Structures are given as structure tokens and as C-alpha cells.
Amino acid sequence: MLIVMNHNATQADVDAITRIVAEMGFRAEPIPGSERTAIGVLGNHGYVDDTHILELPGVQRVLHVSKPYKLVSRDFHPEDTIVDVAGVKVGKGCRPVVVGGPCAIESEEQIIKTALFVKNTGADMLRGGAFKPRTGPHTFQGLREEGLKLLALAGKESGLPIVTEVMSPDNVGLVAEYADLLQVGARNMQNFDLLREVGRIRKPVLLKRGMSATVEEFLAAAEYILAEGNDQVILCERGIRTFETATRNTLDLSIVPLIKELSHLPIMVDPSHATGKRSLVAPMAKAALVSGADGVLVEVHPEPEKALSDGPQSLTFPGFEKMMNEISKLTVFLQSC
Ligand code: PEP
Ligand code: MN
């Protein structure tokens, strides 16, 4: 439930409602806006009788939210959230960001070379997996903590904030020691213990859409993170499973403007995992930015043919540079925060 206050409601009106909601056994969360304050009511299961609330001073109307998410919704929080990743701002009104890097950190040489290259071609952040969620157990699983150390070194050498995946609740503390932005991967979008754990840290989180997740499930997953107190969440569309097998997944670009209607959180797009095919990555990165995405996440490798994971979708260095040149010409790319 959301209690929308009149624009001339006083702080005393807001405080009184907060107290009354608490007496009803729920949690009240005032959300100040530029025009008016709204008060989110949390902790109710099902419909709450609003007759008493509607009569209180300062109340304009009451909205009953039947969706499984509230904190992430625009109804609760009309202003766009800007996520700050070690000084790089992501969200509405900011220049869209480009996150580049290999699927997995493989060696010091590989990650440093890539970091310096993506930095010099204009990327804003460096990505690289140290804990890899692979389909089968006999493939490369990542360098784990050693990989985190190499990624941190590459981040330092290039001056780029670093993004890396955390797969288990037990490793959140460890990954947070190194990463500037913690990624929760598609396969873990509904790992609720992991979502709660990243909700308790004070570092931003990149939440990828599960490969079979509906928009409602995606937002409900983000709600777990916000419900623990961390509102620094960037959503990421990375393609969903459909009947189509010509591409690795089907990139659902309509989710970008849809999420902007439903939520205040920024959304990025990963055209690499969405398509699985190098030649499709740059066109879909550009399409994502034109559709309003707040950034793109792109895999790039110095020698994709030797990559230990996701070589076929990784851009070469010249391919990445070409994509960067092309997207720098898009007008959306000229905004600043
Ligand atoms: C990744 O970004 O390396 C990754 C594994 O992505 P996803 O979770 O989207 O498959
Ligand atoms: Mn990958």
C-alpha cells in the first residue's frame, strides 16, 4: 500500500501516519519527492483497510499495490535512482556507460592488456569473472580469489571500477572486498539467500535477468535486495530463452522502456550473452542504447579463439574499438550526469 500525501502536508502529518501505520503492525517508509511525500507501507500480506487512513490530515489518496514488489516500483519511488559505482554514475540523465572485459579472468597478462585497451577506447568499467557459473563441472570454473586479485590489479592499473560475479552467499564478503560492482548472474537471479546477502552490503549490485524470468519475477528479485537496505541496484537484460535457437538467447529490448515505466532503477543490456554471436554484439549494443538503456556490458578478449569461456561472443580488440566509435556517435551518448 502507498499513502500519497497532499503537496502541502506537513512533517507532523507524515510523522503521525508513520506512527499509526506502526501501530497497525506494519512498517512505514516515507519517500520524499520533489512535489509531495509518499509513505510506503511494508509488511502487510493482502489488502489493508484504508478507511481510517484516508481520513487523516494531509492524505491525498491511497494506492493498493498488488504486485510482489514495492520498493523497486515507480509508484513507491517516482524519482529515478542513480547508482554510483566508485564515482561512475549510472542512471537517467547520465551518459550511458560501457562495461568491457573478458568473460573470465584467465591470467595477469590477459586482464591487464584488456583493461588498458578498454580504458583507452573509452570504456567506463572493467568486467571479468573470477567465479564462473558454468553449465557443466568439467569446464573452466574461474580463478576464484586469485582472479579477484588480478582483476583488482587491472582495475588499479587502468583506473577503471571493476565488476565481477558473486555466486554464493558465503562469498559476498570476499567479493565485496575487491569489486566495485557485484554481479548476480542470470542463473542466480532467484537465489534468495544470495539476494538478501548482497542487500546487506554497502556496494552496488548488478542484477541480471534470469533466462526464464518474467519482468515481474525480475523486479521481485530486485525487491529482495532493496528490502535489506541496499537501493544501489542496476538491472541487466541479458536475453531470455525462447524457441529460437539461431541466437544463444533472445534479446528482449522492450524490457528497457518497460522497466523505466515500472521502476526507478537503472537498466543495462548485455548483448554478448543475449546473442552469443560476435557479429551481433555491436548492432544490439547500439540498439540497446537507443532504446534507453543506461549502459551496455560487453565481452572482449585479446584472443577470443583461445578464450576459456564464451570466445564466440567475445569481441576482438578491433571489433570493440569499432563498436566504441559507432556508439560514441549516438546522440544518447552525448548526455552527461
Ligand atoms: C557473465 O556475465 O559472465 C555471465 C555468466 O552472464 P549471465 O549470468 O547473464 O549468463
Ligand atoms: Mn560470459
Image: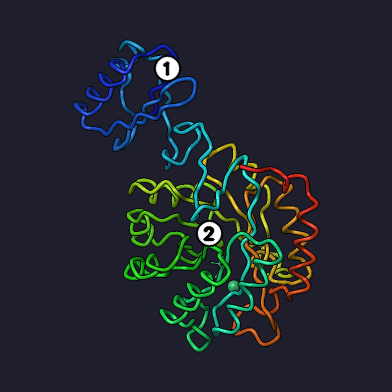
**Within the image, what quadrant is residue 101 found in?**
bottom right
Say if disc 2 is inside 8 Å of ligand 1: yes
**Within the image, what quadrant is residue 237 found in?**
bottom right
Question: Looking at this view, is 62 or 265 the one in front?
Answer: 265
Residue 335 drawn at (x, y percent):
69, 43
**Mark number displayed over residue 208:** 2
**Mark number displayed over residue 189:** none
Q: Residue at x 68, y 74 (%)?
A: 314
Residue 129 drawn at (x, y percent):
52, 74
The image shows residue 310, relative to residue 291, as above or below, that is below
**Mark number displayed over residue 61:** 1
**Within the image, what quadrant is residue 202 found in?**
bottom left
Q: Are marks 2 and 1 in contact (CB under 8 Å)?
A: no
The image shows residue 20, relative to residue 310, as above or below, that is above
Quarter of the picture holding the N terminus = top left
What kind of element bears circle 1?
strand
Residue 290 drawn at (x, y percent):
74, 47
Q: Is residue 296 left or right of residue 198?
A: right
Q: Residue at x 47, y 79 (%)?
A: 147
